[in-house]
Amino acid sequence: MSLHDPVILTCSISGTVANRDQCPAIPYTPEEYGAEARRAVEEGASMIHIHARSPDGTASYEIADFRAITEAIQAEADDVIINYSTGAIGIPIEKRLEYLRELKPDIAALNMGSMNYAKYSARRKGFVFQAVFENSFDTIQTFLVEMNELGIRPEHECFDSGHLANLDPFIDMGLLKEPLQISLVMGVNGGIRPTAKNLAHMASEVPAGPDGPNNWGVIGVSREQWMLIAAALSLGGNARAGLEDNFYLPSGEMARSNGDLIAQARRMAEDIGRRPATVAEARELLGVPKRAAV
C-alpha cells in the first residue's frame, strides 16, 4: 500500500461491553444502528463493523438481532460493506457460525491468535476486566473453512506480530485467498503496545502477495487511536474508528456520534493528501463483490 491509495475507513459502530452511562451515543436498537451508520457513511466510511445488541443494549449473538441491525443499516446506508464480528469469550463457535451461515455478510472478522485480553486501570492499580481470548489454530481453521464455503471474506485481526505469522500456514494450505485484509489491533492489554514504532514493525510483517502488497489497516483502542491512525495514514494503511474503540476526539471532547469520529479520520487523511475510498473502490481493493439486488 502507498500514500497514493485511497483510504478504506471502517466504522466500528458499537462494541458489546460499554454502555450509555459511559457514552450516550452508543446505539442499542436497529434504528439507532442505522442512523449511526448513515452518519459514518456520510463522513467517508465505506465499511461498517457490527457487534449485535438486543434493543435493551445487551450483547447478542442471535440471528434475529444481526438481521434487524443489518437491514436497518442497509436501509440507511445503501451499498456499504457489512462486516460482522465473530470474536467472543464464552460463546460457542457453532453459535457464532449460525449468523454467518444465515446472513452471509460481505466480510467477517477473524482473530488470528489466542491471548490474554484485559483492561487495566492505573488509577485503581488493578484489572477492570481480564480473560483468556481463545483463538486456536483449530478455531481459526473452522471459521476459515466456513467463510470460504459461504463466500465471506475474512478480516484478519492481529493483536501482536506473532498473529501475523499465524497467517502463514493458512496461506500455505490454500485456505486464504488474496487480496488479504489485515487489521493491526493495538492498545489492548495482552497485545502489542500502541506505538507508531510498533505499528511500523507490524506493517512491515504483513505478507506480500504475488501481485503486490495485501491490504492492512490499524485498529487503535482508546485515545491512542488518533496517533495510530496518523501513523497508519502516513505509512499508506487504512484505518478504523468508532465507538467500539474510542469515545473521544483528539481535543478530549466526547464524540456525539460515530460520524464525528469518522469525520476526524477523514480530515486526517485529507491533511496528508489522501482521500476516503468509495464503497466501490473498497470492494475492488478487498476483493468483495457488490451485493446482488434483492
Image: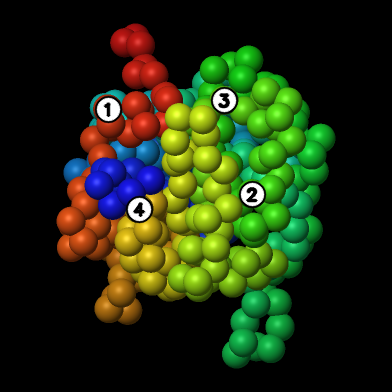
Q: Secondary structure at mark 1?
A: helix
Question: Residue, x 50% and y 64% (percent of image)?
Answer: 199
Question: Which of the 4 image quarters holds residue 256?
Answer: bottom left
> In this picture, is 231 found above or below 88?
below
In the picture, measured across the screen, residue 140 lies left or right of residue 150, that is right
Q: What is the crowding at mark 3: few (fewer than 14 residues within 10 Å), some, or many (at least 20)? A: few
Q: Earlier in the sequence, mark 3 or mark 1?
A: 3
Disc 3 vs disc 2: Cβ atoms closer than 8 Å? no
Between 237 and 96, the residue placed more toward the observer is 237
Disc 3 vs disc 1: Cβ atoms closer than 8 Å? no
In the picture, measured across the screen, residue 277 lies left or right of residue 193, that is left
Q: What is the crowding at mark 1: few (fewer than 14 residues within 10 Å), some, or many (at least 20)? A: some
Q: Which residue is mark 1?
A: 280
User: Is any atom of residue 76 visible in this view?
Assistant: yes
Q: Position of residue 195 (x, y in %)?
A: 50, 73
Q: Position of residue 95 (x, y in %)?
A: 71, 31
Q: Which residue is mark 3?
A: 177
Q: Which residue is mark 4?
A: 236
Q: Earlier in the sequence, mark 3 or mark 2?
A: 2
Q: Earlier in the sequence, mark 4 or mark 2?
A: 2
Image quarter hosting the C terminus: top left
